[in-house]
Amino acid sequence: MTIPPLLDVRNLKVRYPIKTGLFGKPVDSIAAVDDVSFTLERGETLGLVGESGCGKSTLGRTILALQQPAGGAVMFRNQDVFCLSPGERKHQRRFAQMIFQNPRSCFDPRRTLGASVRMALDIQEMLAPSERDAAVAEIFRKVGLRPEHRLRYPHELSGGQLQRVGIARALILKPDLIVCDEPVSALDVSVQAQILNLLNDLRQEFGLALIFVSHNLAVVEYIADRVAVMYYGRIVELAPTHQLFNNPRHPYTKALLSAVPSIDFTRRHEPMPKLGDPPNPARLPSGCRFRSRCPMAMPRCAEEDPAMTALAAGHDVACHAALTAS
Amino acid sequence: MSKALLAIQGVKTEFRLGRARALQAVQGVDLSISAGEIVGLVGESGSGKSVLALSMLRLVQPPGQITDGHILFDGEDVMQMSARALSAWRGRDVGMIFQQPQSCLNPVKRIGWQVAEPLLRHEKIGRKAAWAAAIDLLRAVGIPAPEEKVLAYPHELSGGQAQRVMIAIALALKPRLLIADEPTTALDVTIQAQILELLSERCRTLGTSLLLVTHDLGVVARIADRVAVMYAGRIVEEGPVEAMLTAPSHPYTKGLIAAAPQLGQAQGGRLKDIPGAIPDLSRPYAGCAFAPRCELRQSLSLKACDNAQPAPTTVGSAHTVRCFGAAGSIQSEMRVTS
Amino acid sequence: MSLVLDEPIMATPPRWRMFLLRLLRNRSALVGGTILLLLVLSALFAPLLAPYDPFKVNPIQRLRPPSWDHFMGTDEVGRDLFSRLIFGTRYFLLICVVTASISASIGTLLGLLAGAGSRFVENLIMRVIDVMLAFPYILMVLVVVAILGPSLWTGMVSIGIAGIPGYARLVRSAVLTVRREDYVLSARALGASESEILFGTILPNVVSPLIVYLAFSMPLAALVTSSLSFIGLGTQPPAPEWGAMLVNSRTYLFSAWWAVAGPGMALFISIFGLNILGNGLRDVLDPRSGR
């Protein structure tokens, strides 16, 4: 018998209503996450990349059961997170935490930061009430802040410092999994490096599994073990980081990679990809959804939606052209 | 080098915070842009780069105020212009585009009229001719089916298309200078690549100078001729793009280049971060603003860093740096090699 | 581990002290607050402050102009106006507190439910609120008074009820805004239950707009109550309520102006005070107003 993975996402679908009727019933909806499956082992980091509107943040939130799916299952620690009683769900939440993109908005402006972090312990009733403050001080030290920062209000700290507190709040419950939703996108480059280093240290120390959602490919390459590329609700390529960045197979992944502006001066004159404009998410093309912008599109792409298929060990891709080429 | 189109000297801009406090956003900046040149102005948030860009056009709004300095455009003193001359100059000779194209377009007007408006105002042409010109302008910025798109309203455009429209409007009168403040920051990478290409292509074709304000060195590396790096209200290093990226002198520039993870870089190792945070610009300080975060200062332990402002030192052709340590180390290196 | 800036960390003063400090620096909050304080003091110590019994009729002294004995004059049955005005503060504050607590408590609860409840609950509450709003304010008050009979209490209750929709709408829109904030999502991710989120995180963040609205709506309620008395549907004589006093003396407007001026000025100053207090609070409670 094999040990089941920490997280097993099966055929997950999430839909957003875009039009509602007179009495609030959804009439039309778009698929933010459309039939997504993957697994994540303990201590592993999965990068989730894609452009805005591709559903990567929605996927992250749905895994934490912060959003209701339209179909599919998320097995976390061997339990389906959508079929839990309120008590079970509360217990389950302890093991899966979240770090937000904007550290300015993820703290209650009326609480001190110490109180915000302590709230995690209070809600989960971890430790004796008298030990909680000491635990908060300890975790503040761990993320590179001083215990005195506990008395501060959110508006008194810089973005980088606040993101450290955000990490502290997620970490204090000793979770198995943290979903990081664009954790460094709102930060300046110099501070971004501090936070990435911190995350990198902590995940090793705590044996954390991370789902690292980002639009920044270089950041994902730096931190992830495996990377999933999303396009309009679908994972189109999933591979170990090294393989995905050095041998991308899906034309969308290739386009993304060549579009990243590099500070390497020798790459200055490399041609940039000429992708057309993105499609309307409510009216995606038939068959393969990338077809309308794909340089390799062929007749078959209009008829048949490509399924995720293994090209090599652990390297899955959903593209007719890539499969025929190999 | 050809004569400067825009030259600013010693520009200082501050924002009054209260009776006795002011935020020194720009603390004495010299910068010049030649005709047809693309200059990248790079800095992190709070470095004063956007305020500097606004100051160049005297567009700083109260409580902000330009307190000192000269701004010369083609030999004409912008600081002395009357309100009327100023707005005529801005309309005719300079264009500006911003980070959020959607919020810069008037939501209740068809984009055709928004593109045609500067033509109607500054060139004596009729509505029909202006409309036709608008279609041509939209075609030039790569809007598909411009004959139909002129009738669209801004909300019907994607972010990338809206930025193309903004570029069309900004370049409608063939200005001699275009200032683009983070023009691609709100866009996806694949769209960003296209917009950068478009910006550089249009500016080179029209002979328009471009000041590209951005936090992303990668963007600058792609299209700029020259780069100026700003930190805490001052330009700390300035030079040709190749020299700046391959042989940066200022520890801050070096730090910026090292801190951003790059594609294809070895994975897993530690990123070289710049410890600490930007200084509070409402508190005056004597020394180099970067000193508290500077590695070089720690290793050289130079006293000057805390007590005086470094003067610009030339370290290469048209490459200057404001750093006591960097200038010194270059000299010592030169001594060793010669 | 990463370096932490070595700037000294001073303890932030407690929130209430920061609030008080800012309140004292804000001129309109200061003036409004002082007026409110004076009202409260005179209501508390009315028997000590008033030189005469406010109910004692003295036909000999009727309609006397201001003098050393009665420095605001007397009314048509010879009662000392100044004493009646002092005791009137009790009525004024009573009206403010009762009407405001009826409308604020019910309105806030409905607003919270509408903002955080299911779509069905929201629709139900908001449609009822819409109907209440479509009904003219005064007409609604008149209907309630007509049913319950004219008295101070029915006046206050009816005005309290009429004020509910305003609070409910305010709170609902504030909840809808706060509910979208990341820190609410974060509380949910930490495992907080819906009621913990609603009362622990959302409610404290809608309190500031609520306080401001309170300061603005209290004088309005007081004004309407006084108007009710003025048309004879509110406080009944001989209670020294300012509105009722205005009614009684209006027939002597030309012969004894002081009998009208006294309660008129008292109403004006009190309502003005509460209004500018509201203005001041709005500035003080706005987080963007700096430290």
Image: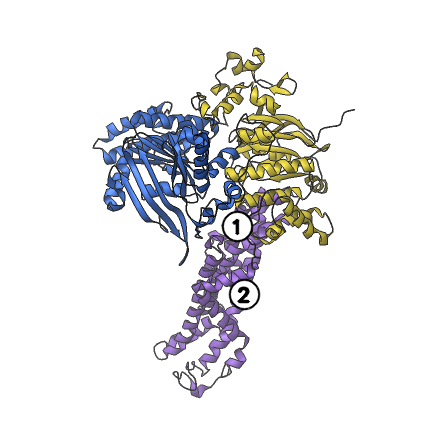
Chain colours: A yellow, B blue, C purple
On the question of residue B259 being in view, the answer is yes
Dot 1 alpha-carbon crowd within 10 angstroms: few under 14, some 14 to 19, many 20 or more: some
Q: What chain does badge 2 belong to?
A: C
Left or right of C249: which side holds A77?
A: right
Q: What chain does badge 1 belong to?
A: A
Name the residue type under label 2.
Val
Asked whether the beta carbons under mark 1 and mark 2 sit within 8 Å of each other, the answer is no
Circles 1 and 2 on the same chain = no
**How far is the residue under mark 1 from the one under mark 2?**
35 Å
Residue under circle 2?
Answer: C97
Vertical position of residue C125 compared to residue C275: above or below: above
Q: Position of residue B144 (x, y in %)?
A: 38, 23
Dot 2 alpha-carbon crowd within 10 angstroms: few under 14, some 14 to 19, many 20 or more: some
Q: Position of residue B212 (x, y in %)?
A: 38, 34
Point out the residue furthest to the right here.
A1
Residue at 26% x, 39% y: name it. B89
Residue at 46% x, 57% y: name it. C283
Q: Nearer the viewer, residue B47 or C37?
A: B47
Point out the residue furthest to the bottom here.
C60
Name the residue type under label 1.
His
Badge 1 marks a residue whose secondary structure is helix
Point out the residue furthest to the left here.
B124
Badge 2 marks a residue whose secondary structure is helix
Q: Position of residue C184 (x, y in %)?
A: 59, 45
Vertical position of residue C141 compared to residue A268: above or below: below
Residue at 36% x, 77% y: name it. C257
